[in-house]
Image: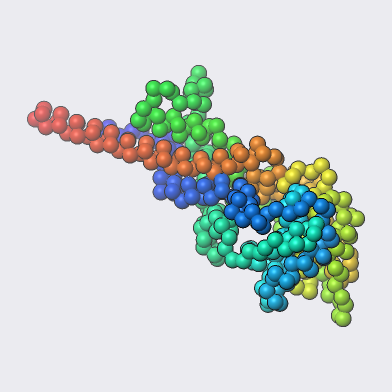
Amino acid sequence: MTKLPITPRRILFWIHLWIGLPLCMVLAVIGVTGSILVFAHEIEALMHPELHHASNGPAKPVAEIVAATRGAAPEGATPSFYSAPESPGDPAVVRFMPPGRTQPAPGGIQVMVDPAILEVLGSREGETFSRQVEMLHANLTIRDRSGRDIVGWLGVAMLVLGATGLVLHWPKPGRWKAAFQVTRRARGIRLMRELHGMVGIWGLVVFMIVSFSGVYLAFPQATSSVVGVVLPAKDLRAASNQFKATPIPQGKRIEVDQAVTLAQSQVPGALRAVFFPGRPDQPYRVMLSRPGANDGGPPATIFVDPWSAKVLGIQDPKDYSAGETMLAWQRPLHAGDGLGWPWRILVFLSGLMPVVFAITGIWMWVLKRRAGRLVRRSSLAATKAAE
């Protein structure tokens, strides 16, 4: 049997095959869980409607909302995060840290409250449905750093699969129209190949954007360094950790509403969230949405010293460099936020693409191996007949 020559295209084919074939199932799981998370808020509202419907009145001050939730939190727990209602009729959410903890952790004890009438709607503790899906998507339920690293490298694999797939399925001259559709009479390997290529070429741009943003979320420092080579940018996460409060002996920390007022005096905008200080040297982190900014896009973050009542620093998207703007948008883009419903639906569909790739890719591989066996049997039979 004649061996096919080794060409650059064939090398790309083997790279595409032997990355995609062993990893297709886990990549499908990552994709499907990502699609679910795009609509996690709506799913949680359907599962627990009593926690997600509030009155439409104006919200009370943050301190009053937090005070109203303390009775629903365990004794000794401290507030770590406040999330403002996303739209009228939505609840405010206050997250509490268990006693003795100084660093916020995902999940925790969350209390939902009607921000207009200060009625506690209920609380959630432990692993909610969306949290379980997020754990599977972000770190394959492996709770240490290795889980996120594995998912980050799976994101790199998706980028390689997307790039090699683009080359392998690049339409020949005069075949561009055929690349965007499946031939009506296509069957067997041809049907799987055309479906595989069609889904890839229609969704490639969104697939690559979401995959890249996933790699950034797993490896923010490394990705920032790579982006910084092309587009000057500083690591915004590292920069935010440099803002430290200066504790005043026998001093008293300002209330959260004063921190919000100070933040809004520097950056006009609607309150989106507040991170409370967990240690004496931590500032308030007040997150604001500028008027007219994209809903769900990168917020402005103002760091307020709770002891001196001074603004320590501001991270405002309007002042970002091109590279910093690109990096700041990675989380919203990955979650389907910031660009309205069309982008949200596209991100949802991109999460289903690995499932289609897995089914069509495995089926092509099975059909090709079956066809290869038939060819070898026929060749062997012909050889024996000639003898």
Image quadrant occupied by the N terminus: top left
Measuring 54% from the left and 65% from the top, which residue is drawn there?
Answer: 143
Measuring 86% from the left and 58% from the top, which residue is drawn there?
Answer: 263
**Would residue 372 be visible to someone looking at this image?**
yes
Identity of the residue furthest to the bottom in this view:
250
Estimate the x, y position of residue 293 in percent, counting from the top left: 79, 43
Measuring 60% from the left and 44% from the top, which residue is drawn there?
Answer: 210
Image quadrant occupied by the C terminus: top left
Estimate the x, y position of residue 185 in percent, counting from the top left: 39, 22
Residue in front for this viewpoint, 118 or 92: 118
Identity of the residue furthest to the top in this view:
174
**Would residue 213 be visible to someone looking at this image?**
no
Count every numbered label the image shows and give the total: 0
Residue 222 is left or right of residue 244, and the answer is left
Residue in front for this viewpoint, 125 or 175: 125
Measuring 67% from the left and 63% from the top, which residue is drawn there?
Answer: 122
Residue 356 is left or right of residue 375, and the answer is right
Identity of the residue furthest to the left in this view:
387
Residue 153 is left or right of residue 292, and the answer is left
Estimate the x, y position of residue 270 in percent, counting from the top left: 82, 51
Q: Is residue 203 above or below residue 333?
A: above
Residue in front for this viewpoint, 115 or 287: 115
Q: In this view, does 12 lie above or below 277?
A: above
Applied colour scheme: rainbow
Residue 278's image quarter?
Answer: bottom right
Residue 266's image quarter?
Answer: bottom right
Estimate the x, y position of residue 295 in percent, counting from the top left: 74, 44
